[in-house]
Image (cartoon, grey):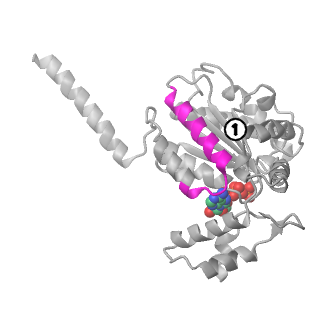
Amino acid sequence: IEPISMAIAVGAASIITGYFSYCRFAECCPEQRPLNATALQLALEEKLFGQHLATEVILKALTSFRNNDNPKKPLTLSLHGWAGTGKNFVSQIVAEHLHAKGLKSNFVHLFVSTLHFPHEQQITLYQDQLRKWIRGNVSACASSVFIFDEMDKLHPGVIDAIKPFLDYYEQLDSVSYRKAVFIFLSNAGGDLITQTALGFWRAGRKREDIQLKDLEPVLSVGVFNNKHSGLWRSGLIDKNLIDYFIPFLPLEYSHVKMCVRAEMRARGAAVDEDVVTRVAEEMTFFPKDEKIYSDRGCKTVQSRLDIL
Ligand SMILES: Nc1ncnc2c1ncn2[C@@H]1O[C@H](COP(=O)(O)OP(=O)(O)OP(=O)(O)O)[C@@H](O)[C@H]1O
């Protein structure tokens, strides 16, 4: 081999080696990292209780998005449901499967409405900040993940600032947003989901028979018409820029028990069924007559376990 080719080969090899050893210590943006769909499926099936629709849709949506080398738009998921049903929990699982450090990754960004966008008078400022923040982060890492929690507390119109980023543009000001993932979390639509779940229960039908088509259209229309959804009359819905509306069903007594057991195992304790029952019985259930669904889902399980 002639000396110049040799030098180029050695140089290239050391750049590649340097890059990989650098990425062992610092976090690198995983442009081409494929999604381990089997691991994601396992995590959802093992850890997320009572949410057959969310499990199925999230798995399908992420797998097809990540298997596509040339998506036409970023992936946008809107998660809806009662408090404590697993929306933040699932976002954490998804984040961990897209970026190894999960919510702690430099490429996963969590916005909380009441913390980051509290004042109604500053909507224009928030919109500017949001656009700059997203543009900067997607420029640094195309596969960035943005999670917007408490969408129902977001002032109407704020989110429309990012509409162009969610659209089918190849590039905007030299930045492509097509590989990014946007996840919206909201309690809005929780009542509609409960009504449907209750309808199935009262008709003696299985919870698992509820299909996405029973809920998704109701949800998108309900959220669009709800002034307190963060997506009220939003161009994101109008222009079909939200890929999936994902319903989180209200959790039943048996699911609360599963959460207690999971929490005990996570603490390294043996599962004590007496304690599991005591914690589950401390929770309150609705509707008033039937008492089927936990009104806080699994949210207070950890603190109740602490005081037993
Ligand atoms: N479906 C579920 N399966 C397993 N664990 C769950 C589920 N739902 C909730 N949990 C447990 O309860 C905790 C609180 O739930 P989470 O924060 O995901 O609720 P949320 O739906 O985001 O509620 P909110 O709308 O009030 O923000 C989770 O960290 C998890 O431990």
Q: Quadrant of residue 231?
A: top right
Q: Position of residue 218 (x, y in %)?
A: 83, 39
Q: Is mark 1 within 8 Å of ligand 1?
A: no
Which portion, as a residue range, is magenta? 46-68
Please indicate, yes or no, whether residue 142 appears anywhere in the rendered image.
Answer: no
Which residue does the image show at 16% across and 18% down from the upper left? Answer: 5
Pick whichever, 289 or 112, lies toward us. 289
> From the image, which quarter does the N terminus lie in?
top left
208 sits left or right of 228 in the view: left
- Residue name at image x 86 percent, y 33 percent: 233
Query: Who is closer to the viewer here, 173 or 304?
Result: 304
**SS at mark 1 in the image:** helix
Of the pair 273 and 64, the residue shown nearer to us: 273
Identified at 82% across, 33% down, the residue is 234
Q: Main secondary structure of the magenta part?
A: helix
Q: Which residue is mark 1?
A: 130
Taking the image in four quarters, ligand 1 sits in the one at bottom right
Left or right: residue 166 versus residue 265 is right
What is the crowding at mark 1: few (fewer than 14 residues within 10 Å), some, or many (at least 20)?
A: some
Residue at x 73% of width, y 42% of height = 211
Residue 291 percent across, percent down from the top left: 83, 67
